[in-house]
Image (cartoon, rainbow, N blue to C red):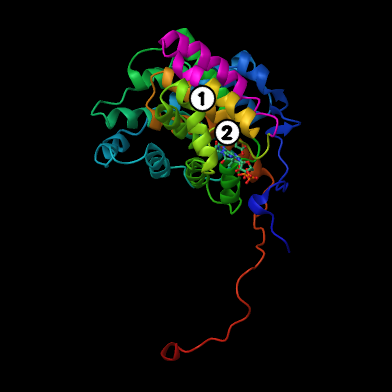
Amino acid sequence: MTATRGLEGIVATTSSVSSIIDDVLTYRGYSIDDLAEHATFEEVVYLLWNGKLPSQSELDSFKSELAEASELPAELLEQMKSLPLKNTHPMTVLRTIVSTLAMYDSEAEDMSTDGNYKKAIRLQAQMSSLVTAFARIREGKDPIAPKKELSYAANFLYMLTGKEPDEISETAFNKALVLHADHELNASTFTARVCVATLSDIYSGITAAIGALKGPLHGGANEQVMKMLSEIGEEANVESYLDNAIENKQKIMGFGHRVYKNGDPRAKHLREMSKQLTSITGEEKWYTMSVKIDETLKQKKGLLPNVDFYSASVYHSLGIDHDLFTPIFAISRVSGWIAHILEQYENNRLIRPRAEYIGPDMQQYVALEQR
Ligand SMILES: CC(=O)SCCNC(=O)CCNC(=O)[C@H](O)C(C)(C)COP(=O)(O)OP(=O)(O)OC[C@H]1O[C@@H](n2cnc3c(N)ncnc32)[C@H](O)[C@@H]1OP(=O)(O)O
Ligand SMILES: O=C([O-])CC(=O)C(=O)O
């Protein structure tokens, strides 16, 4: 038995949710470019869960199911007010509260198809309310209830700020949600599948996945990108910052990918959005600095940006706190996690690989008093 580091190149399951073939990303056979240009996030969630695009009436009822489920239990909101939110990373809060949500769900242990679908709707709807409620509570403000008539994207920005977003912001945020919704067997999705393959419940799978997404080698990279941009400060400092980072063998956040070696197809959409939004805010420097980093790393290291790189300046331009970037990734990716969890349940087998043992040879046990 020989181990492959990081399971690189290992095909661990079959899946019909999304594919990356020759650097082309599709959700259920639809190109990410088409979906990013034309689809609402709700259409994409429906597509991921049902394997087909919704008709208008199917979409309408799906949206109202989500809207109906989006309010958080009042007791939970009260409970959140008593937690030490100010000094806790939002992903830690999200991981904890998503797990707590199961305690408010009388159907948490219902493993029927219908029970799982209801939980899927609740989780997708409530995670957005949760992130925005948290962001307000930690600032001493009251959470804002979702408006049932708004889109998922608009509602998030509304619940966060108290203002309905303009069309450009809503479109940009919707596109970002679409681009992050699923990505084959990435680390957090694999985590979710491993968890529920023991026939544990959806809340457990999503809680585990949030934990995996949090790390800076995965979803946590988007927050770190903004930290790096702030540290660099201006375009003139890019070259020396990168030379120093390369010399010290530092990982540059938002670059590189396990699967894409010719570039992440989502990055170009986020780059365009970064250009558009920074020109509106008048803070073009985040875009120009990002482009300079992109070009310099390509030339010096052959490294290309992944989905996390330009999303940082996009979210910053929408006025979002930097530590909420990864929770935003989670409220989109929960749609993909759920699609994979439901797929896993449909054709389940315990996921239990082997390890190549590299420890000591068989040892003789020595009694405690003789050691
Ligand atoms: C949504 C997402 O999860 S997208 C990924 C988000 N994560 C990041 O942006 C963090 C920065 N990137 C990385 O750490 C990596 O590129 C990962 C984790 C994404 C992929 O890792 P792996 O597939 O294991 O690639 P690995 O780390 O082996 O890199 C291969 C080579 O490229 C280099 N490399 C890869 N990414 C980077 C980077 N961001 N900065 C500097 N060098 C890098 C490695 O140092 C390594 O060089 P070497 O062969 O000289 O040692
Ligand atoms: O697929 C991966 O390894 C990481 C990634 O880009 C994602 O989860 O969107």
Residue 220, image x, y percentages: 48, 37
The amino acid on which the numbered mark 1 sits, given as a three-letter code, is Ser
In this rendering, is residue 43 above or below 93?
A: above
Q: In which quarter of the image is the C terminus?
A: bottom left
Residue 300 percent location from the top left of the image: 62, 32
Q: What are the residue bounds of the magenta stretch?
A: 261-289
How far from the left and from the top, in percent, is residue 124? 49, 31
| Residue 265 within the segment the image draws in magenta | yes
Q: Quadrant of ligand 1?
A: top right
Whether residue 172 can be seen here:
yes
| Position of the N terminus by quadrant | bottom right
Q: Mark 1 points at which residue?
A: 311
Name the foreground residue: 323 vs 36. 323
Real-space CA distance between mark 2 and mark 1, rounded to the nearest whole angstrom: 12 Å
Q: Is residue 348 depicted above or below 222 in this figure?
A: below
Structural crowding at the residue carrying mark 2, measured as other residues with C-alpha within 10 Å and reported as few (<14), some (14–19) or many (≥20): many
Name the disc covering residue 255, or none: 2
State the residue at coordinates (57%, 23%).
Answer: 178
Callout 1: helix, strand or loop?
A: helix
Determine which quarter of the picture holds residue 324. Answer: top left
Position above or below: 338 against 172: below
Q: Is residue 363 left or right of residue 322?
A: right
Magenta-drawn stretch contains 122: no
Q: How many labels does the image show?
A: 2
Q: Can residue 253 be seen in this view?
A: no
Identify the residue at the far bottom of this view.
Answer: 370
Q: Which of marks 2 and 1 is in front?
A: 2
**Residue at disc 2, CB closer than 8 Å to ligand 1:** yes
